[in-house]
Structures are given as C-alpha cells and as structure tokens.
C-alpha cells in the first residue's frame, strides 16, 4: 500500500503556542484539501523547545494544552501526529511541580488514539541531558514512569494503531533522542519493532550542527534497514536560543525507506508542507533513492549563519545594524554577511582609527564599504582616548585618611583596552541607538576561547555571529562569500595582512606583528580543549607531543609544531599560557559575552558549562612536563 | 554507646582536588591524633561540585580517583566517610562518555567497605535537576543503575557496616538530595531504615539559600524522629559558581539526635573540624538540644554577601576595587560592604557627575567616602559626553550608492545611555585597570528584572553583589550596616532621596521624580514572576487583582494597589509594560550581565533558565483583561 504523508516542516516560534498552532491548522487544512490522510509535525511543535523555564508557568502549560485541543479538533478526516507538552495535573515530577511529558500525540477525527498506553499520548523514552539539552530538568521520562507504575519500559512501549479506510497502520512513535539510542541501555526502536511496526515516525526538534545530518542519515538508514521498516523524520525550522547560544533548526525532514535509502526530503531551513509517499506492508521502496549532500562544508556554515542572523533580527525586531570595520577579516566577513541580509542603507559601517591604525587597513575598510554599498563613516578615537587618559591621570584621588592625593598612571596595556572600549561602548553603542538599531560583536571562536578581547570593547554587541567559527573558518567563509558574488566583496589585501588588533606599536601590521595567536596551531589546540567529546587537557597535549602524534590528533598541519616551537620549553610555555587564559580570565569574559550563533558541534554558552575557577593542571601533566624538560626534548 | 565523630566542614575549592585532598588529609591526621574513630567529609569533597563540564576531562577524573586513593590510604585507625566522583571506566553513561557516579566512600584501615553493593562505594539515589542543579547531565543515578542491573532500587540500597573496636555500626549513607525525598517516588531513608540503620550520614554540598537551613532542620528532624535514628549532616563551606551565578556554601553541619533535636552544630561559613558525640544503639539523646536561629534575616544576607564577596575576591586574585558612587542607596551599600572586607586604601570610590546630578547627591557621595575612609575622586563626564554627542552628530555618514551624506541625531534617551556608558566603560574600567583592580556592578534585582540599566553602562562590572536583592532589601541591608557599625556609614539622607538615575531633567530628585519603578509594588510583582516555585504570569496577577487578593498573594502592603493605580486601565498598562520588559529586552541584558551573588531562593543566571523570546500573554489573561476593562473595574 502506498501511503501519502504530509510533512509539516514548520518554523516554530518558541514560546508562542498561538502562532505555532495557527500555522499548523493552516497546514492541516491544506493537507486535507489535498486528500492526504496523515500529517506529521515536529516535536514540541506547539510550545517550542528551547524556552528556558517557561515550563514552570502553569498559565503557559494550560495554553499549550488548549492549543493542543484545537489541533485534535482539527483532525477531521485526517490523522495528525504532533508534538506537545503533556501535563498530568494529578501527579508531580521530581521537582514537586506538576508532571510534564515531552509527548507525541496522534489524533484522528477529533480524538486522540490511546491504545493500551496509560495516557492518550506517547512520551519520550530517552531524554538527552548533554550538550545544550537539559530535558530532565523539565520532563518526566519513560524510565521514571515505568518505575512509578511498577512496570518496565518494554511493556510500556507500544505502537499506535491508526485506521485509514479500514487499513490498520501501526505507527512507531519516536521523539528525537529515541532514535539515537546507541549509548543507552534502552533501545526504543528495537522494542517497538518486535511488537510490530509498519512505519516509524520520528518527530524531532533538532538544532543544526555541522555534519549532524550526515550522521543522522547513517544512523537512521541503518535502523530502517535493520527493521525493514520505513522511518519518517520530521524536524522543525526556525531559531531558538537558551540565552547565551542561538541555535538554528534546519528541518531536513526526510523519508528513509525499508532499505534505508532516503527517497524524499524537505529543503533545509525552509518552512514547508510537503507530501511523501511511503510503501506500507511491503518491503519495497516506493521511490528511487535521493542523494543527500554532506552537510559539513563552508556552504552549510554560510547558509546556517545567514539563516540564523536573519531570524534573530526578526525575532528581536532589529532591522538596522552598525558594524565597526577595522580593515581586518572578522569585521569584513561580518559586514558582508549582513549585506546579504539587510538593505544596504540599513547597514552602517564605522571605521574608528587611532594613531596605531595603518593607512592600509583604513583604506581596506573604506574599500569594503564601497564594495558592499553600505553607509560608511569614519570616526577617529585619537582625541577621545587622549582625553580619557589625561582625565584619569590628571584627576587627583584623595586618601581620606592621610588627606594626601595620589594619581594613577595609564600604561600602554591600559591604553589598548581604553581604545577598544572607546570604539564599542562609546561610539558603536551611541551610533547604534541614534541609528535605531544594534551593533555587532565581530569576535571569532579563537579569540573567545582565550579571552583575547576587551570587556565592553570588542567583546560587546547584540549578537556574535562569527563566535562559533575558528579563525581559519572565518577566512574560509570570506573566500566563500567572495566566490558566490559576481565580484569579490572583501578586498584581496584583507586576506594578506597579518591579523592584528592594531592597538599599539607592538601590533604594527607592516612589521608583520599582530595577534599573539598562531591560528594555524592554536585554532586546533583550542578546538581540542573545547569541542572534543572527551575534553582534551594539557596532559593529553603533552603526551601526544612526546609521542610525536600531536598534529595528527589535533588534525592540524604536519610538521607545524616543530616549526613554531623549536624547543620543548617554548612549547610548554605557550601551552600553559593559553590553558590558563582558557580556563581562567576567558571564562569571566564569556560570562558577559553576547549571544553566540551556534554552528559547530559545540558552541560557547549553554553547551559548554563552565565556572570561574583557578586553572588546574593534572598530576600526569606535571610528570610529563618534568620528563620533557629533563630530556631537553626535542633538542637532545 | 556514645560515638565521637569528627565533622570536616571544609572549604572546598572547586576543581582543585589537590588542595581539597591536602586539607582533608590534615583534618584526618588531627582527628586521629584526638582518637576520634570516624570522620565525615561533605559530598564531592575532592573535586568540588559546581565545576561545569570539567567532568568531561578524563585527566581530571583520573586525578580525583588518585586523590581519593590518598584519602583511603590515610584511613589507618580511623574510618573516613567522604564524597568523590566514582568512575566506572568499563561502562558508559547516557552521553556515551565514561560512566560517573556522585558517590559516598567509606574507608577504614586503608580499604573501602563494599558490603553487598555492586561497587565499593554508595551512589546517589536522587539527583536534583531543578534550580541551579543539573546532576543528570554528568552523573548516573541509582534509578538508572537499578534498571541497568535488572534489579530494584530497594534491593540496591544497603547500609554500610563499619566495625569500631568490635562494635558493628550500620551507616545509612545519603548524598544530599537523598534526604529531600518528599517529591520523589523513591524514599532512600525509609528503605534504608527498614534494613536497619544505626546512624544516618548525609554528606552534602548544599548552597546557601535564605531560609533553607530552617527548612532542612524541619525536614531532617522529622526523619530522625520518625526513624528514631540520629542523622549527621555534613556540608562544605566556600564559594562555587556556574559562571553567571556565584553560590556561597554555609556549612551549618549538624547532628539531629534520635528525637529529632539538634544537639551539635558547626558555625556557618567556617572552615572547621569539629567533634560531635552521638548516641548509637539507644533511643536516647546524647546532649541537650541546641536552639538554632532562623536563617532568613537581613543579618544572614549580610553574612552571606560579605562571605561571598571575600571569597570571590580571593578566587579571582582581585584585591583592589573601584566603585562608582552616585550618592544613591545601591552604590552606598556596595561601597560599605567592600569597606567591611578590604583595607580602605584598596577601595577607590569615584563620583562621576553630569549636569543632571544634584548638588545633594554629589555631597552624599563625598560624605559616604569620608565615612568609609576610602580613596575618593570626582571625575565629571559633562565634557566627554558632549564630545561624544558632537562627534556622532557632526561626523558625516556617506551613502555609497547615492554619494549623499547624512547625519544622526542624539535624542535625550540616547544621551541617558551615553552618560551611563561613559561612566562605566570609559571611566570606571580605565580607573580599575590603572588602579590594578576591578570595578563593581551595583545593580539590584529589581533593575535586573526589567533591564532598567544600560548595556556596558551601569550593567557592567566584575561582580554584581547586590543583584539578588530587591530594592527594599537593599534599604534593609543599608540600615543593618549602619546599625552594626559604631556610627552610621551611609548618610541618613541617602535613605530619604527618591531613587533616581539622574540621567535627565525628568529624573530630578528635588521634584520627587526618579526611577519609573514603584518598588513597594514592583519588587513584589517581579518576585512573583521570578522566584515563586510555580512562576506567576500576568494571568495570575489579573486574576488576583479581580479577586482582590493581589497584595495578599504578593505579600506586599495591603491597600497599595488601589493607591498606585486608581483605574484598572492604569494597572493593566503597568503590568504589560513590565512583563514585556521582563521577558523581552531584560533577557538580552541579563545575558551580558556580570556574575550575580546568590542569596535568595532564586537568583538570576543558572537557576533561571531563559531565552530571548517574543513576550507572551496567555489566553485567559486576555479574557480577564477584557472582563476587567468592560467592567471598568474598580470605578464602577
């Protein structure tokens, strides 16, 4: 039997059950008009997913239930599968609040299908509590319910039987993580398959992560193949955030046939209603397989960032942007990205030179503005910075005890930070408010990792769109942007100058000086600290260094380490310096950083829980260090 | 039998197993020298508790194990009960990483006591996942283990038997939340008691929360009484943070005898080794009961904040502080607090007047500095603010398309924010770095609730010590500070002037104008939004307003609402205005706010998960609003 299924890959507005329901009702109507017998919506399609502690507002829960009833009522002549919060007002969760389930509802002809289940909905079996997820904070899972009811998960898990013109179709309802059971002792798909399933439906709310779709396709294909059962995967689009980190949702809903091939799919980042045909009751593919492109390229990053920025602007009702442009690569990429989103006269680029800024970078900033066709202004900071230095140094400070006065001295380092703050907190913030918009934070992930930025200076902004990209990815993105436009937007010389903050004579680009970061190495080192599933510490780094496998383990250029660090002393000095920054002051800076737009497998913010602590080196690290320095490796 | 037990109420340094172990070894040695047969340390005493994702570093886990072995080896002639992370390297957790348990170890004569348990340690049964806790992110709990082993929690839970000179004592080992089982279907104390326990030991790492000790004493007393078994409660001191929120740990370790009376206790916020005597085998108290004071007074707040600031300064190695003093109450309290901690010449108070600042508040700032004996300076911002306005307004902006120039206008509102940023990001930050220290954020919880503060302005700082206090609590704290000093530190007039930012003529204190917040009401309204266990929304507020129970439910002054809002229209206008701020722009500001020192039952940060969203009003809210406005209540 060939079954048509409508996939409601809708854009979910988190915390707006009214708007989401309205969109769902329209899709249901459309599918019914097209005589499609089944429509499937994503996980938590009514409330949204990343909504913080909104789950603790009972008024919100009641509304989600109420809108859920509207969907159920709308299921006349169509079967609707959708995600919503399910509340058991008679029971409590572990927190003493009313008990909530992340649930999958199946409605037909105005009624929910219950079967033998204790509730007229199915609840999520596996709840992720890693990365940005913290479902156990809010939802009661199937494992707890089984203990509570004195039964087992296996006996609780049952397919949902729907009747389509006399044909009984057994749906295996899965909620997102239920399909990712590799690391769990419970395997919902296996349990359900044994009980007899004609079609698995995985409703998800799964944020975009570089390369995640490819992984999902491998995992889900295998499940379809092993159970000889097709799987429909339905994911939402839109953006949702947990405050510090903004996630884009790419949708990419698709159909895996019983052989594990993808035979239909929805376009990424597209709010769409689409109809899939799936073969039920027979192990035969309905359609030829589709080739899905890998999703870990710079093109995917570009698409995710453009989508994320656009949606973030709509969500915050900001449509005018000020960007400080230095002539360097980060601000150039930031400006180019926004110019692909907003009308050019709603983007104001500001160059804010001091005496340390070279004529070259000033010209590059201007050239960039011309290429982009944005509004452009030059606001020097020399006078104001001097004014601040004089004011601080010349104003007497009175010691109330001794009645003596003292005065403070502004060092060259203090002066660097004064410049950075003058640019952001004095000029960009004032420009933005007068312009009627917001200003961006152009920081990248390498800088954010070690706090190479100034509080209330270049760390400030309403959104940090590049803060989940390592420096080398910023360059890659810049090249990509230049390639997809008729002529390059970012001037060629921006790629050639050494990265530099140009805040002192020590950072003169003409003498080749610049940032203290050696991105070819540090990008990869910090990535190992931060992104690896088992976080890498200096212990592993030294151990790999000793074994000669460091470049291999970091996936950076072979031979690089020896070139940068002629001696082990220098290598260790550098490692300790950045580890202390990474786990020390940089944490304080990240606490006050703007929201980060996430694309990687771990972005700063909620997916990287951290605390201000005294940095720590492990016991074995000290052993290895001693060994290395005694050996005088690698000179010996 | 009268048993002596040493309580190691130590200051735990989070993420420093080396330092914690050293302190524990010293206490073990001291207890042994005093011939005390048992010593008990807090939960996770080796690694610390709030350490973010440090649990994902295997090097760190190995060190915790290694230091744990040192403690075990040191248990010669003494029984040591301590908390540590326990790693099962052969198994995985739900996240695919190595499996970790939050565990209680009991060691004697160099060996761990295992009994019939599957591991030579006991693991936590109940893991909190509410408030600032997210244990399921990292630890595998007893419920999952029971399912995994195909057994039940009840059969897993077993007392630990220790042999003291031939006497077998059955310890009921509990980890923190195990003693707070009211909302859980599993009750570890009840299960253990049935199996026979001579003494319960609850090892905890429990952050201070106003009034929590009183609640614990009620809960734990009841448990001791109902099981006729004494309970030893051991908690650590020190501070730990999860980035955005800094928690103080008050210790307050104590002994509940078999009648539920507290017969011995450790002083709050004190790193101490103390010996308790407990009656084993007989239902007879060993000592007369002690009266424990309630812990929800302003004195407790003062103590917690002073402790928190002091420890935060040590942890961040900051010993010089700059505080902007306006003559208002918040900055005065902040300055007074720091002057109770640091030498007066390490505190620099800066008054930064503009033309909008009254002579009165300038004088009050100076008077405060004199009273405190701190360093004092006056740095006017009039010139620099005017410079910024002129620079922004006079610098042409080029439209690259039309080649026309435009210019921006600075509104009065823009100018307010320019002043605030000029003070913090230009002056205070520069002063702090030149002075060699940091500057404070003086924001209170009322302001933080609705974003009544300027990004990179008064929202900036290294720590916000008052940000968990409502405005009325700031006044209360000010009075308390004045009372505990030989003569008042905060000038009397500071209490009398209306709270005002003095950023425009609209905020002139002499005409009685000032903040748009009516603290007598809004403090209580925002507290209901934010702190109530079931978060209050405008729906409940309107419903209470209609019922005439609003003041009662908010715990504010009776009759207040009608006095402030003569009509329902005005009431609703105000409610919507602040709800939109609270759930809208204020979220963006909190994302970039400094760390908050927590004292209340919910502080901003990790205990208040939130996302930037479009504010939402519930269906019933709109119904009630319609009802109210039609009724023209309460004028009709």
Image (cartoon, coloured by chain):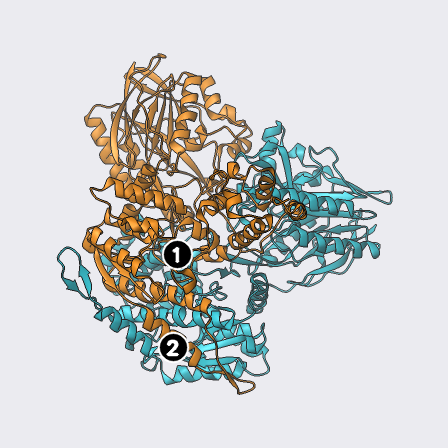
Chain colours: A orange, B cyan
Judge whether residue A378 can be spotted in this image.
Answer: yes
- Specify the subunit that label 1 lies on: A
Q: Is residue A155 above or below residue B146?
A: above
Q: Quadrant of residue A634?
A: top right
Residue drawn at (56%, 86%), measured in percent from left and top?
A402
Residue B437, position in %: x, y? 51, 69
* B583, B369: nearer the viewer: B369
Q: Residues within 10 Å of mark 2 (few under 14, many from 20)?
A: some
Quarter where residue B580 is shown: bottom left
At which x and y percent is residue B401?
A: 15, 55
Q: Quadrant of residue A456?
A: bottom left
Q: Is residue B432 above or below residue A20?
A: below
Label annotation for residue B498: 2
Residue at left 40%, top 78%?
A391
Q: Which residue is mark 1?
A: A500
Which mark, residue A207? none
Q: Please say whether residue B334 is visible from this viewpoint.
A: no
Foreground residue among A119 and A375: A375
- Judged from the image, the secondary structure of the residue bearing numbered disc 2 is loop
- In the shown orientation, is residue B187 left or right of residue A582? right
Secondary structure beneath label 1: loop
The C terminus of chain A - image quarter: top right
Q: Is residue B391 above or below residue B98?
A: below
Same chain, labels 2 and 1: no
The spot of residue A27 in percent (x, y) is 24, 33
**Residue contact between numbered discs 2 and 1, judged by CB atoms under 8 Å:** no
Nearest the eye: A489 or A120: A489
């Amino acid at each position: 039997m060939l079954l048509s299924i409508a996939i409601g890959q809708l854009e979910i507005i988190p915390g707006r059950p009214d708007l989401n329901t309205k969109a769902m009702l329209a899709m249901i109507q459309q599918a019914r008009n097209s005589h499609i017998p089944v429509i499937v919506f994503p996980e938590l399609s009514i409330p949204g997913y990343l909504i913080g502690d909104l789950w603790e507002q009972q008024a919100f829960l009641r509304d989600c239930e109420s809108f859920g009833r509207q969907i159920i009522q709308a299921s006349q002549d169509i079967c609707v599968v959708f995600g919503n919060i399910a509340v058991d007002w008679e029971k409590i969760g572990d927190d003493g609040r009313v008990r909530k389930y992340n649930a999958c509802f199946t409605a037909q002809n105005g009624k929910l299908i219950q079967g033998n289940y204790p509730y007229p909905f199915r609840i999520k079996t596996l709840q992720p509590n890693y990365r940005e997820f913290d479902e156990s904070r809010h939802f009661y899972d199937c494992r707890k319910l089984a203990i509570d009811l004195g039964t087992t998960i296996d006996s609780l898990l049952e397919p949902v039987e729907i009747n389509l013109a006399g044909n009984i179709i057994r749906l295996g309802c899965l909620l997102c993580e239920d399909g990712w059971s590799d690391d769990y002792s419970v395997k919902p798909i296996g349990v359900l398959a044994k009980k007899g399933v004609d079609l698995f439906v995985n409703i998800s709310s799964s944020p975009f992560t570089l390369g995640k779709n490819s992984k999902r396709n491998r995992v889900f294909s295998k499940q379809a193949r092993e159970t000889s059962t097709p799987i429909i995967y339905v994911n939402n689009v839109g953006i949702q955030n947990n405050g510090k980190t903004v996630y884009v949702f790419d949708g990419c809903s698709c159909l895996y046939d019983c052989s594990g091939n993808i035979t239909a799919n929805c376009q990424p980042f597209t709010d769409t209603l689409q109809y899939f045909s799936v073969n039920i009751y027979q192990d035969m593919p309905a359609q030829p397989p589709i080739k899905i492109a890998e999703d870990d390229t710079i093109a995917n990053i570009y698409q995710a960032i453009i989508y994320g920025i656009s949606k973030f602007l709509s969500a915050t009702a900001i449509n005018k942007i000020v960007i400080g442009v230095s002539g360097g690569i980060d601000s150039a990429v930031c400006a180019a990205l926004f110019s692909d989103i907003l009308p050019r006269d709603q983007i104001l680029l500001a160059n804010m030179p001091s005496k340390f800024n070279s004529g070259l970078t000033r010209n590059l900033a201007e050239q960039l503005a011309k290429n982009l066709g944005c509004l452009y202004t030059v606001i020097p900071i020399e006078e104001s910075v001097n004014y601040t230095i004089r004011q601080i140094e010349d104003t007497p400070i009175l010691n109330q005890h001794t009645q003596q006065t003292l005065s403070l001295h502004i060092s060259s380092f203090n002066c660097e930070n004064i410049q950075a703050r003058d640019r952001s907190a004095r000029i960009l913030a004032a420009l933005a408010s007068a312009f009627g918009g917001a200003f961006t934070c152009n920081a990248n992930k390498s800088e954010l990792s070690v706090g190479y930025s100034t509080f209330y200076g270049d760390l400030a902004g309403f959104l940090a769109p590049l803060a989940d990209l390592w420096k080398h990815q910023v360059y890659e993105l810049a090249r990509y942007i230049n390639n997809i436009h008729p002529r390059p937007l970012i001037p060629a010389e921006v790629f050639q100058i050494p990265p530099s903050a140009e805040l002192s004579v020590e950072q003169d680009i003409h003498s080749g000086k610049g940032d203290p970061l050696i991105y070819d190495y540090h990008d990869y080192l910090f990535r190992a600290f931060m992104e690896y599933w088992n976080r890498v510490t200096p212990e592993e780094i030294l151990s790999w260094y000793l074994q000669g496998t460091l470049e291999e383990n970091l996936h950076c250029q072979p031979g690089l380490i020896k070139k940068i660090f002629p001696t082990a002393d220098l290598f260790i000095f550098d490692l300790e310096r950045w580890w202390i920054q990474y786990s020390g002051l940089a944490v304080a800076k990240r606490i006050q950083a703007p929201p980060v737009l996430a694309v990687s497998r771990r972005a700063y913010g909620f997916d990287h829980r951290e605390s201000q602590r005294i940095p720590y080196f492990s016991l074995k690290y000290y052993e290895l260090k001693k060994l290395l320095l005694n050996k005088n490796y690698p000179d010996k």
